[in-house]
Image (cartoon, grey):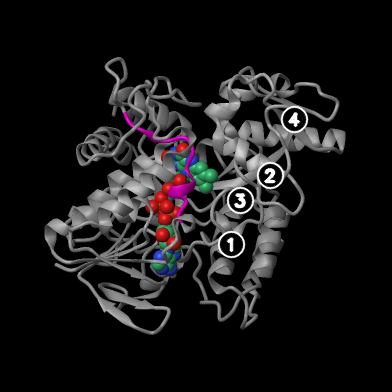
Amino acid sequence: MRTLVVGAGAAGLWCALHATEHGPVTVIAPGAAELTATAWAQGGVAAVTEPQDSAELHAADTLAAGVGLCDPDAVRVLVEEAPLAVQELRALGMAFDEGERPALEGGHSARRVLHAQGDASGRELHRFLAAQVAGDRGIDRMDGRVVAIASDGRVARGAILGDGRSIEADRIVLATGGACGIFGRRTGPDTSIGEGLVLAWAAGAALADLEFVQFHPTALDVPGKPARLLTEALRGEGATLIDVHGERFMTRFHPLGELAPRDVVARALIRVREETGAPVYLDAAGVSDVAQRFPTAVEQCREVGLDIAHVPIPVAPAAHYMMGGVLTDVWGRTPVSGLFAAGEVACTGVHGANRLASNSLAEALVFGARAARAELGPPPEPPAARDGSFREPAGGLPLTEVRELADRTLGVRRFGPELDALVDRLVSAEHPQGDRVATLVERLMAEAALRRRESRGGHFRVDFPEPQAGWRVRQAVDRDGWWAIPLPEPEAARTV
Ligand SMILES: Cc1cc2nc3c(=O)[nH]c(=O)nc-3n(C[C@H](O)[C@H](O)[C@H](O)COP(=O)(O)OP(=O)(O)OC[C@H]3O[C@@H](n4cnc5c(N)ncnc54)[C@H](O)[C@@H]3O)c2cc1C
């Protein structure tokens, strides 16, 4: 059994390490660690490791964050297997910050977020996994990009690289990360534009939950500079959000103030910016030992000439995480036999409408390992009935325009008529030099957002500001059109 892993973040590297049990393994991805979101992660890995915590509590928190759209089976797999992944990592020599107890993060009812090297957890996890893969395990690590999956729509047999070479494999695992790179304001790598989504789509797989994007409220807002993330843990340690007059405002919007859910804080920030016509600031002057405890935040602010220990930092929301992705079962399988997806590119259903903080590295590890072990078939069967269908676009829009449109129309607040106009613009985008991948991803995201006539989790419609019971369904799409995936009743979903 030959395995080809596409992508070298947490999901791809962990998958590759597990796939060696079944035969030869090749990992293909551009070389640099900075091209993975994994290396950018600051918080850590959510896993139950404390006696007073439990899988049931972790599941309940995950389901609550997902606002009724999580797949309870996928959630059960995540919460039960995340501690096993941590145990396995420790056995291999990964050093989590052992002296400290796991951290408490927003939305978690117990301490369960494991850090490594403080707020550089992702960089440390990536360094460790990359070293394991480079070690003496016979994994072939290739530098390059996959531009197509060799598939007849039913069975995948390999991949085609950007330089025209092809690689045959029995198992192809897409671990290509998320798609927030289609936004101008994003906290992650520029290159995460959803290539894996389009590879899977073109091979005959389906995508789901595309309307759900998590916007992080506190990303740097300095004109002309990247929107670097300023971790929520700063607010957990007492940093406040203030307007241009120095007034705190979050208590107006939510009883939890600065620690309200991310979507609530993001909308409040935009509202206050509109009210005052001026930026909003994160004031961390009251956080003790900020330089020692938040070296990444300090460095990111220093790079733009700001000293977070002494001056309020201008912040605004930025696209941070894609809840949607390639629709898979709990083994990472798609309807195309031999084609799997794991990590942020996949949509197992664990996040529903909103991701619980630090569940994504856990997901990458748990489902990366599963994709390495899963039987090749039978893959999940898609339903016969669809709504609408797609003409494959021949071109696209330039990436700068895709990003400008996403920021303007697909951001924290969405409005039906604007989404409608955006879809029209993207459907007719045929520029031969345009970015076909980013344009298609944005078009599917915009259509999903337009179809969902309610607000829930990461998706907020100003024209439908409340959740609607009738919308407790997931939306999926493939080249033959859209369909709805029904979910069990909430009570059943909670007995995980
Ligand atoms: C600033 C920031 C902070 C975060 N903090 C946390 C946190 O504290 N805890 C948490 O759980 N999550 C966090 N997240 C989210 C988390 O980092 C990601 O969801 C997770 O790392 C995704 O891992 P992955 O392996 O799926 O993808 P990635 O780590 O993004 O890796 C994708 C890989 O695929 C490659 N690739 C893409 N396209 C192709 C192609 N066509 N051919 C070949 N290779 C390709 C890329 O180059 C890369 O190697 C954070 C994200 C950001 C941006």
Pointer 2: what residue? 413
| Disc 4 within 8 angstroms of ligand 1 (CB) | no
Q: Give the amino acid type for the residue marked by disc 1 in the picture.
A: Glu
Q: Nearer the viewer, mark 3 or mark 4?
A: 4
Pointer 1: what residue? 442
> Quarter of the image holding residue 78?
top left
Q: Is residue 66 above or below residue 318?
A: above
**Which stretch did the figure color magenta?**
36-47
Q: CA distance from mark 3 to mark 4?
A: 21 Å
Q: Earlier in the sequence, mark 3 or mark 1?
A: 3
Q: Is residue 166 above or below residue 54?
A: below
Q: CA distance from mark 1 to mark 4?
A: 34 Å
Q: Nearer the viewer, mark 3 or mark 1?
A: 3
Q: CA distance from mark 2 to mark 1?
A: 16 Å
Depth check: give the residue in front, 391 or 440.
440
205 horizontally vs 104: left or right: left
